[in-house]
Image: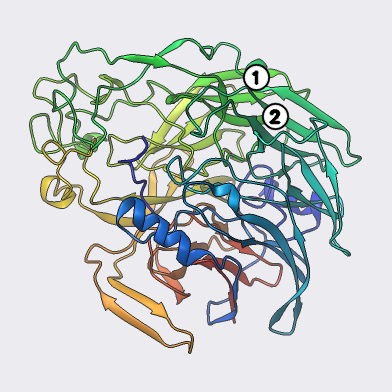
């Protein structure tokens, strides 16, 4: 689902399986987050199981309606973890309160296959809480991992639980000694090749608003298989970034209702955007640390009070800073750059374009080259490609809120970008001594080109920019970020499955549906498995042809959900708070 910006601004595959022995033990499969397995997926002939794991979806959708006027599902969910005949998936309990996520309870269910049934073996209820509210960001992800013969589960106060896979009983591992309610385990858990668990923790300041005060601190934490704890403050890992009390360049002024002041932007060719207090550098919520085969750890940070002041951080295996690179001032595809030249905005002076005479290529909101933003609605996590380079899906508003997929070399050099990156951990397809990158490629409608003011940024993208109309694709890029193929979702039907398993449909999406997958399965044949907001799970062949698709539960606007796969080739997907397993 596109961001509701009106309220807030092959070696790797083999290594992963050898180290852990589970089919899908963590976010995006392995510590490099590649998503590619060495087995072929089954055909999507049937939904073998359909299990509700989030019974609060009706309330969550109503809460989104109260905020945005649309019944969307603005909650991130974990990737199902697959371990032989066992499957681990989150569950939730209420009550749900859009003003306070922490009223809910999260836990993990162990299921065991018996024929074509997934039976509950046990449930472990965690004391983990999500920070914030629906007024701050989409509901953050609760994401365990399998390692060292155990299940590791996020816990309260920056802690984690080590849960016995046989009994479902847990032992807390706490880096901080006590449980501070303002300290949060704030990322999926990552397992490296040595079985170490890595994750992020954030301690907030006072106040009820998540962003009302600067944070106290944030940490990268590493727990060994024996339970030894190491932690390092992100203030040490982000040396060279502005401090919490420093001023950082922001954007030109917009009113609370989304109208912009002195538009179209930029106000003049020499206009300088105002500054604001940066806030302390911390990891974005939901960012799973990535670990390269050489032991280098990668994370992505932002200033707590400003999503534009952002960095890719490389961390040595001894938890010291290796290098830090800003995501700002990286793109020149803004004002006046036509699609044929790599841009996405109409020419200056055209509807949806910048002010006539604006500097070529700048972000109209800042009058600077575009930069990758890190916003807490996102679950984008860094990916380590087979050549050691790093990919990160950042947010940008000025290209119809599509973001940019950014590419850095292992030494920190910026290598380039692709025109979409918002809320995704792209998949890697290794083949023939090289690799390709599988990415969402949503060309959103109903958001305007760079602002929420229809006077300057009309919502009808297709009418104002017919050369770059609303459309929704999965695209594959080569290692140089050039497109190899695209598959467009042209389905117009919104469908729903009732309690009797009957499916009814209405044609109401003339431009198709956006893709809501945020981490892919790529099988041994290069088939990509991705879910869409039309409620279907898709299997896409190499070359961009449709292999198969299967309808799940409901067509709805949703925050992003990942796919997983078992060693038998069954595909695990989710839709509307339901866990589906599809196969022959």
Quadrant into which the N terminus falls:
bottom left
- Estimate the x, y position of residue 144 in percent, counting from the top left: 71, 51
- Estimate the x, y position of residue 329 in percent, counting from the top left: 37, 20
The vertical placement of 463 against 47, above or below, is above
Question: For residue 494, what is the image quadrant?
Answer: bottom left
The vertical placement of 70 against 331, above or below, is below
- Estimate the x, y position of residue 345 in percent, counting from the top left: 20, 36
- Estimate the x, y position of residue 163 in percent, counting from the top left: 83, 54
Using the rendered image of the protein, determine whether residue 316 is visible from the camera's viewpoint.
no
Numbered label attached to residue 237? 1
The vertical placement of 27 against 237, above or below, is below
Numbered label attached to residue 584? none
Q: Residue at x 45, y 54 (%)?
A: 74
Quadrant into which the C terminus falls:
bottom right
Q: Are marks 1 and 2 in contact (CB under 8 Å)?
A: yes
**Image label count:** 2
Q: Which of the pair 465/43 is nearer the observer?
A: 465
Q: Residue reaching furthest right?
A: 226
Q: Is residue 103 left or right of residue 171?
A: left
Q: Residue at x 21, y 66 (%)?
A: 510
Q: Spatial distance from mark 1 to mark 2, Cα to Cα?
A: 9 Å
Q: Residue at x 69, y 51 (%)?
A: 26
Q: Is residue 540 left or right of residue 38?
A: left
Q: Which residue is mark 2?
A: 220
Mark 2, Cα crowd under 10 Å, few <14 / some 14-19 / many 20+, is many
Q: Earlier in the sequence, mark 1 or mark 2?
A: 2
């Amino acid at each position: 689902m596109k961001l509701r910006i009106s309220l807030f601004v092959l070696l790797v595959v083999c290594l992963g399986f050898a180290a852990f022995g589970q089919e899908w033990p963590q976010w995006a499969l392995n510590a490099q987050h590649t998503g590619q397995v060495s087995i072929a997926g089954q055909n999507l002939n049937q939904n073998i199981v359909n299990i509700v794991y989030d019974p609060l979806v009706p309330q969550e959708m109503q809460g989104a309606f109260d905020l945005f006027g649309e019944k969307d599902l603005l909650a991130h969910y974990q990737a199902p973890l697959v371990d032989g005949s066992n499957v681990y998936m989150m569950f939730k309990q209420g009550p749900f309160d859009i003003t306070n996520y922490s009223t809910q309870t999260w836990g993990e269910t162990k299921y065991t296959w018996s024929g074509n049934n997934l039976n509950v073996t046990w449930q472990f209820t965690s004391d983990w809480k999500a920070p914030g509210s629906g007024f701050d960001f989409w509901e953050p992800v609760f994401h365990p991992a399998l390692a060292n013969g155990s299940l590791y589960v996020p816990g309260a106060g920056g802690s984690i639980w080590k849960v016995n896979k046989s009994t479902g009983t847990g032992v807390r591992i706490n880096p901080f000694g006590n449980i501070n309610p303002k300290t949060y385990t704030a990322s999926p858990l990552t397992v490296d090749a040595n079985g170490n668990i890595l994750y992020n923790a954030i301690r907030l300041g006072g106040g009820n608003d998540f962003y009302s005060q600067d944070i106290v601190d944030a940490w990268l934490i590493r727990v060994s298989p024996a339970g030894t704890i190491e932690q390092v403050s992100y203030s040490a890992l982000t040396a060279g970034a502005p401090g919490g009390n420093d001023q950082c360049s922001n954007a030109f002024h917009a009113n609370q209702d989304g109208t912009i002041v002195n538009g179209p932007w930029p106000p003049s060719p020499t206009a300088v955007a105002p500054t604001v207090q940066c806030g302390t550098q911390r990891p974005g919520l939901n960012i799973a640390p990535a670990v390269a085969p050489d032991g280098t750890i990668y994370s992505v940070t932002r200033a707590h009070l400003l999503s534009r002041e952002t960095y890719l951080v490389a961390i040595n295996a001894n938890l010291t800073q290796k290098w830090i690179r800003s995501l700002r001032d990286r793109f020149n595809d803004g004002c006046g750059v036509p699609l044929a030249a790599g841009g996405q905005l109409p020419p200056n002076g055209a509807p949806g374009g910048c002010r006539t005479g604006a500097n070529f290529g700048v972000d109209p909101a800042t009058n600077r080259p575009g930069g990758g933003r890190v916003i807490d609605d996102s679950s984008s996590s860094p990916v380590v490609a087979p050549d050691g380079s790093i990919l990160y899906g950042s947010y940008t508003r000025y290209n119809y809120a599509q973001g940019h997929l950014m590419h850095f070399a292992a030494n920190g050099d910026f290598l380039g970008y692709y025109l979409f990156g918002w809320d995704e951990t792209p998949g890697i397809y290794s083949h023939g001594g090289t690799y390709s990158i599988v990415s969402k490629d949503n060309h959103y409608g109903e958001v305007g080109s760079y602002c929420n003011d229809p006077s300057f940024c009309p919502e009808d993208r297709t009418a104002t920019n017919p050369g770059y109309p609303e459309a929704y694709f999965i695209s594959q890029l080569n290692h140089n970020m050039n497109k190899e193929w695209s598959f467009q979702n042209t389905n117009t039907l919104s469908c729903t499955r009732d309690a009797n398993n009957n499916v009814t449909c209405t044609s109401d999406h003339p431009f198709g549906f956006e893709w809501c997958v945020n981490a892919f399965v790529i099988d041994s044949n290069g088939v990509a498995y991705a879910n869409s907001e039309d409620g279907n799970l898709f299997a896409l062949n190499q070359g961009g042809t449709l292999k198969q698709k299967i309808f799940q539960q409901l067509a709805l606007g949703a925050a992003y959900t990942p796919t997983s796969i078992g060693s038998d080739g069954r595909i695990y997907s989710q839709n509307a708070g339901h866990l589906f397993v599809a196969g022959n």
